[in-house]
């Protein structure tokens, strides 16, 4: 058989050389279509992974809370009566009565802690995380900067920058940086109203108070599986304010460590009043749910429960909850707490909370 001629071989090579322009465009179009189909799934998977990591952080922090409690007769870290008692003049250990602030301690002289509601440093200590414990302003700033970057204290979905809040001589100038991710409900860590010290700095408000005889102790909170210890949060934020940090050594309302629960009109940590049907719906400049409820919807002013957060309960379990689902008042305060609903902004419930959980809009309510 005669060998194939050279012209024939060349013609075959030409016939199989590369793709035509049309074929390339078709392939590119198919790839683009596949990307457009798969990208939302990849983004969703990435967000789910971040939510799982956030929940893992909360579980680890709860272990720290349990260690602290076991070493301190059940005390809850972050309560002024427990972790910052020394800055109060003549505290009485048996009653927790704090009196007034001790003038020996101030923004330039506060060892160990960052502010009076600080749960970061006691938890860091029991978990073996080193930090600068010195008393000076520079020392306090160093431990604040160190700990706010600690991976365990940062939700992976939190990309929010908190601006420094400085007001007169009560605060400390500092650098903007990552918003603290996790918050406590301050009703678990405040003494009952009448215990001494300024309202919302050591004791509860008259209109929303922990029960008589209460001390911030795990044994006194009620059913631990129904009480939120820590949750994704965004302090200080509401319908007109984006998150900031206040380093005043005796900050009020929980400083940037704690705040009022999402059931309350005046919450500056889990503010839900911009949700459709609530008090500030249609007039709010900011829907603060996008800061605190980071694991769900990201666009503002959507319906309730499209926004989700991770909540860690005192019994050790973690739940991912919708913003309305998480707003049952019983989750945010010790059993027996007394609320004079509607008496002041500090005790007025959010509209959809009243409707959903059969909470009275006015009058006395006692937490189960």
Image: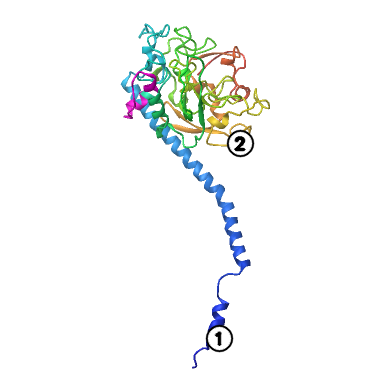
**On the image, numbered disc 2 is attached to which residue?**
299
Q: Percent position (x, y) of residue 78?
A: 41, 20
Residue 19 occupies which quadrant of the picture? bottom right
Q: Nearer the viewer, residue 16 or 291?
A: 16
Q: Residue at x 44, y 17 (%)?
A: 189
Number of marks in the rendered image:
2
Residue 108 occupies which quadrant of the picture? top left
- Label 1 crowd bin: few (<14), some (14–19), many (20+), radius 10 Å: few
Q: Percent position (x, y) of residue 45?
A: 50, 45
SS for dot 1? helix
- Relative placement, left or right, of 255 versus 219 is right
**Most extreme residue toward the bottom, as rendered?**
1
Residue 179 belongs to the span the image colors magenta: no
Is residue 315 among what the camera can see?
no
Q: Percent position (x, y) of residue 326?
A: 53, 28
- Relative placement, left or right, of 5 versus 279 is left
Residue 73 occupies which quadrant of the picture? top left
Q: Percent position (x, y) of residue 57?
A: 41, 34
**Most extreme residue toward the right, as rendered?**
282
Q: CA distance from mark 2 to mark 1?
A: 66 Å
SS for dot 2? loop
**On the image, numbered disc 1 is attached to which residue?**
7
Q: Residue at x 37, y 9 (%)?
A: 104
**Which label belongs to residue 212?**
none
Give the mark nearer the N terminus: 2 vs 1. Answer: 1
Q: Nearer the viewer, residue 287 or 18?
A: 18
- Label 2 crowd bin: few (<14), some (14–19), many (20+), radius 10 Å: few
Q: Nearer the viewer, residue 221 or 181?
A: 181
Q: Which residues are magenta?
A: 122-140
Which callout, 2 or 1, points to the residue nearer the camera? 1
Is residue 247 among what the camera can see?
yes
């Amino acid at each position: 058989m005669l060998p194939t001629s050279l012209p024939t071989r060349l013609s075959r090579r030409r016939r199989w050389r590369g793709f035509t322009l049309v074929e390339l465009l078709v392939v590119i179009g198919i790839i683009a279509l596949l990307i457009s189909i798969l990208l939302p799934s990849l983004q969703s998977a990435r967000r789910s992974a971040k939510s799982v990591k956030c929940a893992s952080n909360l579980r680890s922090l709860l272990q720290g809370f349990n260690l602290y409690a076991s070493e301190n007769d059940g005390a809850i870290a972050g309560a002024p009566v427990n972790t910052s008692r020394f800055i109060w003049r003549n505290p009485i250990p048996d009653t927790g009565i704090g009196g007034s602030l001790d003038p020996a301690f101030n923004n330039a002289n506060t060892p160990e802690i960052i502010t009076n509601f600080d749960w970061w440093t006691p938890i860091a200590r029991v978990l073996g995380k080193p930090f600068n414990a010195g008393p000076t302003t520079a020392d306090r700033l160093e431990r604040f900067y160190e700990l706010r970057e600690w991976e365990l204290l940062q939700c992976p979905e939190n990309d929010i920058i908190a601006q420094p809040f400085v007001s007169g001589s009560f605060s400390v100038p500092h650098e903007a940086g990552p918003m603290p991710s996790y918050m406590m409900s301050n009703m678990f860590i405040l003494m009952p109203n009448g215990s001494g010290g300024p309202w919302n700095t050591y004791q509860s408000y008259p209109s929303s108070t922990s029960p008589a005889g209460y001390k911030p102790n795990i044994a006194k909170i009620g059913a631990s599986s129904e009480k939120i210890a820590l949750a994704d949060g965004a302090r200080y934020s509401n319908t007109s304010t984006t998150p900031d940090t206040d380093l005043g050594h005796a900050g009020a309302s929980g400083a940037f460590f704690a705040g009022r629960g999402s059931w309350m009109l005046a919450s500056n940590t889990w503010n839900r009043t911009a949700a459709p049907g609530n008090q500030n719906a249609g007039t709010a400049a900011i829907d603060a749910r996008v800061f605190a409820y980071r694991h769900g919807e990201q666009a503002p002013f959507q319906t309730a429960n499209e926004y989700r957060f991770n909540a860690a309960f005192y019994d050790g379990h973690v739940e991912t909850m919708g913003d309305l689902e998480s707003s049952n008042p019983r989750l945010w305060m010790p059993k027996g707490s007394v609320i004079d609903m509607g008496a002041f902004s500090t005790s007025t419930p959010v509209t959809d909370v009243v409707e959903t959980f059969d909470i009275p809009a006015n009058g006395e309510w006692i937490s189960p």
